[in-house]
Amino acid sequence: MTPSPIHHPSVQSDTGYRLRIDDLAMMRGGMSLIEALHLRLDAGQLMFLRGANGSGKTTFLRGLARLIPITQGQFAINGITNTADQSAFMRQIILIGHRNAGLEHLNVTDSLRLMASLMDMDISQQQIIAALDHMGITALAHRQMNQLSAGQQRRVALSRLVLAAPQTHRLWLIDEPFNALDDAAINQLCDLITTYCHHGGTAIISGHGHMPLRPDATLTLGTKPQGVVT
Amino acid sequence: MRGMFQPCFAIMLADIRSALRYPGDILSGLSFFIMITTLVPLGLGSDQGELARIAPAIIWIAVMLASLPQMDRLFTRHAKNGVLEQMLVSPAPMAMLMLAKILTAWVIIILPLVLAAPVLGLMFGLPFHMLAGVLGFLAMGGLCLVLIGAMAAALSLGSRQSGIFTAIIVLPLSMPVLIFGVAGISAIQTDHAMAGASTGASTGASTGHMMLLGALTLVLLVLSPPVTAAAIRFSEE
């Protein structure tokens, strides 16, 4: 397998690729989901991760977040490899999984603050409000998490992205972000991702079917032969 | 180092806040504890000497039984809503986050029982001047129980009969706690009896038990957080 061609050499940073994947293989439940994957993403690029249910989108994203061991190959984010020190590696990424990680017994502000603290960010009250405002949920700031609808909880989870600036968090891994969101929230999220990539952030978004943004690259899982279509 | 303590404090604060906002868990454990310790004297009759003799064992068994269901639920909610996943992608070491979680669990699960124990001790004819010693043993042994309970809860995550599984892991491991704890409180009673007889200073047979319990706590403090972290990492795979 040969590395995929680089289509945006102009935005490539001095430190090399933002995301470099070499000969990656991943298994799930005895099934091989990803084989011999080579991938390069530059700063500012957005990749759409497409595939049917069970094709390994979540596995791939969680593998990049080092939650699931890879069976072969290696990858590096901004030059920091998958075997590097936990702290240095995790500082660069943010993962929004399909679970929202909201603490149902806390209010929205406190829940978001805990998530920011887990990412080791020093967050002021204004930043929290700004993050909620960006996802259009300022009015919910003092509501309990368990009183929110599924879409509202998803908005709270996604508002963490506002706190993760491209200067510090180099790679966003977002698992099916458009599920449960209404049109207004989808637009807000698209704005957020576009701005992030415009300022040099790199994002991978999974989904099936329609993608409201124009990605720089698309990786389709579950079809063979596997590869990157740019 | 900056990255280690801020997430830990945040977890402690969030857990205590949640527990205070919905005190049902604390109150159910506490009421179970009070129930056992009041029913036993009622059932056994009012022989003060007999009650004082079995008091240490009853109090310890009540602490263990009242805390077990709460230990079992230590991680279930966080596992379901994805908070554990976010802890794993935190720059802070998972073992440190688990230590924070365990120390908070001590505050939420054990501390209310420790504070209730003196009142209940009076029902067993435990004299008031012995209470400081009893509290010390319960606090220290309670920390052991949470350290064991966290490992068990993490290991049984994802299993359908997690309650049974947790109990099977916890019971044998917490036996030393029960033995040293009961022996320690009994020793306080004899220390006081002897001190009373010789009018000298307290002889301190209980100190030995306290040191053994302390040694056990230290071993578990080193062992439990990484084991808990590894078990959670495995369950989240």
Image: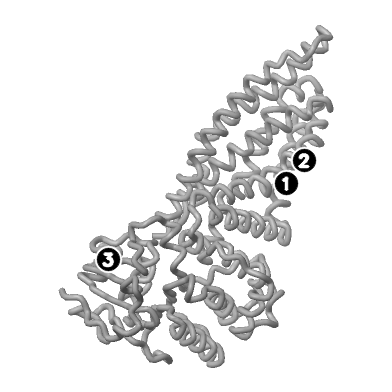
Residue B30 shows which numbered tag?
Answer: 1
Dot 1 crowding, Cα within 10 Å, few <14, some 14–19, many 20+: many
Q: For mark 3, name the chain.
A: A
Give the quadrant of residue B142. Answer: top right
User: What residue did someone put label 3 on?
Assistant: A26
Residue at the spot 62% in from the left edge and 58% down from the top edge? B10
Residue B151 percent coordinates (x, y): 50, 45
Residue at the spot 52% in from the left edge and 76% down from the top edge? A161
* Amino acid on which disc 3 is placed: Met
Mark 2 and mark 3: Cα distance apart in space: 53 Å
| Nearest to the observer: residue A127 or residue B100 | A127
Mark 1 and mark 2: Cα distance apart in space: 8 Å
Residue B227 percent coordinates (x, y): 45, 45
* Element on which disc 2 rests: helix
* Amino acid on which disc 2 is placed: Ala
Q: For mark 2, name the chain.
A: B
In-image side of B132 versus A206 (left or right): right
Task: Decide which of tag 1 and tag 2 comes sooner along the chain.
Answer: 1
Give the quadrant of residue A90. Answer: bottom left
| Nearest to the observer: residue A173 or residue B163 | A173
Residue B170 percent coordinates (x, y): 52, 40
Q: Is residue B189 above or below residue B197?
A: below
Mark closer to the observer (2, 3) = 3
Dot 2 crowding, Cα within 10 Å, few <14, some 14–19, many 20+: some
List the single residue furthest toward the top: B198
* Amino acid on which disc 1 is placed: Leu
Residue B21 percent coordinates (x, y): 73, 61
List the single residue furthest toward the left: A1
Q: Is residue B123 above or below residue A132?
A: above
Mark closer to the observer (3, 1) = 3
